[in-house]
Amino acid sequence: MSSDTIESVMEESRKFFPPEAFAASAHLKSFADYETMYRRSIDSSEEFWGEIASELHWFKKWDTVLDESEKPFFKWFDGGKTNICYNAVDRHATGVKANQAAIIWEGEPGDQRVLTYRDLKREVSIFANSLKALGIKKGDSVAIYLPMTPELAIALLACARIGAVHSVIFAGFSAESIRDRVLDAQSKLVITGDGGWRRGKMLELKSVVDKGVEHCACLEHVLVIPRNVSGPRLECQMHEGRDVWYDDIAAKQSSDCPCEEMDSEDMLFLLYTSGSTGKPKGIMHTVGGYSVYTYLTSKYVFDLKEDDVYWCTADVGWITGHSYIVYGPLQNGTTVLMYEGAPNWPEPDRFWEIIDKHQVSVFYTAPTAIRAFMKWGDEWVDKHDLSSLRLLGSVGEPINPEAWMWYHKHIGQEKCPIVDTWWQTETGGILITPLPGVTPTKPGSATLPFFGVDAAVLDAEGNEVDAGLLAIRKPWPSILRGVFGDEQRFRDTYWCNWDGKYYFPGDGARRDEDGYIWVTGRVDDVVNVSGHRIGTAELESAFVEHPAVAESAVIGVPHDIKGEGLVAFVLLRGTDTNGSDQLRKELNALIAEKIGKFAKPEKIIFSADLPKTRSGKIMRRLLRDIVTGKELGNITTLADPSVVENLKSKCAE
Ligand code: WTA
């Protein structure tokens, strides 16, 4: 660690004020503006949200802004009719605005495409008509498994346009993960591609989908998009009667496709996310509230203007890409940059080259990426002119102060505010965040709640405390509408504390003397690996499918780059307690097959036993302390305290 970073950690209480030049031209210019608007958003919440919603297009105005009668199933803008695709695309595809770039795309090999709002409307309409030609109607579920090409954004918008419910599956997931999601959502169509570039290699997508959908009776078609829209297709096995090439079907479609008039509470999409138990759950978001909330957060958190070139480096396969690559920024009529590949391809300065080349002004990335850039060295950054940047963002996990300071100094050149945004798949949009022209920031804190968000740090009884559980006390427009097909799980997961009065996100937090919130991480068995949520239960149930494995326990431990890494303890059947490298390989392959390569543990430790309480519960905290070499407190609740010594020596191996 350099002396710089040591200093920054010690100066955690340091405050950075929004640069005057930034505030002068920001949508919101002073803390007093924020306070007034925030108070109104809480005290006269329906009036506030009604006014904001009026900035968007509605085919029919809503009857009520918020209906809480069936809490926790809230209804926002009920009775209203709108379409998020209309608000994101059609609204901007008229007059001179139609000629503005909506999407600037760069492929990993360096190929580029620019789609104006006019082009985007045309492409989305043709895509939407292609979906109709395949028999997709309003309310049908469509799974999407694509690389980061413009067609991924277009596919989402096309589904939204005709009222089909999209369920995007990140292209790093395995065939089994695809199957689970297609079956759970009862998807009629899977949209995939013939490939996509990642670190100089072609991603195999079609063959993974083929394997995944083998026994999915609900599936009618697989739509295959060529990676090179105007070039030759890549070799793919096509199943007669089921599989269709997108360019074949698109060639026959009209570019005119009116937007379906959607009820505000019609489902917009499902997105699967990991929890502490069982299989990933389908988080449900609906049209109206999600439109309004992603529109407003994008406008104020990223201070978006028409002439910005906004780049969020997430994959559209995660919620960040849904809300802050596609729906939020496009509803604001800005220019969105999309990049297909890896940050270090061909060299570790690819991101900085892109920023310089396309004059990116707003840049939104994740702490894990920032830590990787720090490791690769400042010289890669220094080679490029980053003066087009005016605002930086961070999302996905708590940002450590030294990463924040590096980001501020090297990428933001000490002139760009940093917005550290806390939110989740379930929240649909950013809930806790600084506003760039307004909020003094502290490295490592997501600071204060956004408009309409009543955030608190509570103990189990619901008292406000300095350190405890994060709680949200009022519903906001893009709150999840449930877990698809599992009402009980929805109630048990999010409404299990405080007599079901407040939303429980599963995170711990503390609040400082200025009322700033510092999110400390998950308090459940969900591990945040490189900003990706992985349920330890998913890995554990995968391991026990191996015939040699009797039991396993997976924990998250601190990791320099990934934030958290996974460590797996595996108990074998029979008398072998040592395992072998071969077995380790097989277990890693099993995880890749069941979940995806990104969920591979850092370390697999074969052990003779696991620390359990007398009632048989695995003491994960103890496992974490053993791995990280922490002082072990009281272990008298253990059924067999000798287990600890054994595990310690295994970890030291
Ligand atoms: C964590 C990603 C601290 C948190 C948008 C949350 C954060 C989970 C931050 C959601 C942040 C996300 N500071 N922690 N700025 N952003 N998290 O659903 O634990 O993939 O519950 O949504 O990431 O992850 P998800």
Image (cartoon, grey):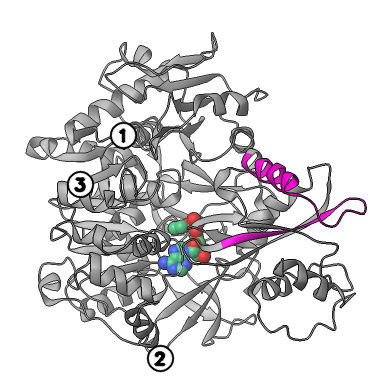
User: Relative to residue 79, is residue 180 drawn left or right?
Assistant: right
Residue 456 sits above or below residue 590 on the image: below
Which quarter of the picture shows residue 33? Answer: bottom left
Identify the image quadrant of the C terminus.
bottom right
Going 61% across and 29% down the picture, which residue do you hit? 212
Kindly identify which residue carries mark 3.
333
- Measured Cα–Cα span from mark 1 to mark 3: 16 Å
Q: Earlier in the sequence, mark 1 or mark 2?
A: 1
Q: Is residue 57 among the parts visible in the rendering? A: no
Numbered badge on residue 150: 1
Numbered badge on residue 513: 2
Q: Give the amino acid at mark 2.
A: Glu
Q: Is residue 578 among the parts visible in the rendering? A: yes
- Measured Cα–Cα span from mark 1 to mark 2: 45 Å
The magenta span reads 565-592
Residue positioned most to the left: 96
- Give how far across and how far down residue 188 sits, in percent: 55, 25
Q: Earlier in the sequence, mark 3 or mark 2?
A: 3
Identify which residue, 488 or 108, lies in the foreground.
108
Is residue 585 magenta-colored?
yes
Going 70% across and 55% down the picture, which residue do you hit? 537
Number of the front mark, 3 or 2: 2
Neighbour class for label 2 at 10 Å: few (<14), some, many (≥20)? few
Q: Secondary structure at mark 3?
A: loop
Which quarter of the picture shows residue 13? Answer: bottom left
- Measured Cα–Cα span from mark 3 to mark 2: 38 Å
User: Relative to residue 82, is residue 191 drawn left or right?
Assistant: right
Going 37% across and 17% down the picture, which residue do you hit? 233
Q: Secondary structure at mark 1?
A: helix
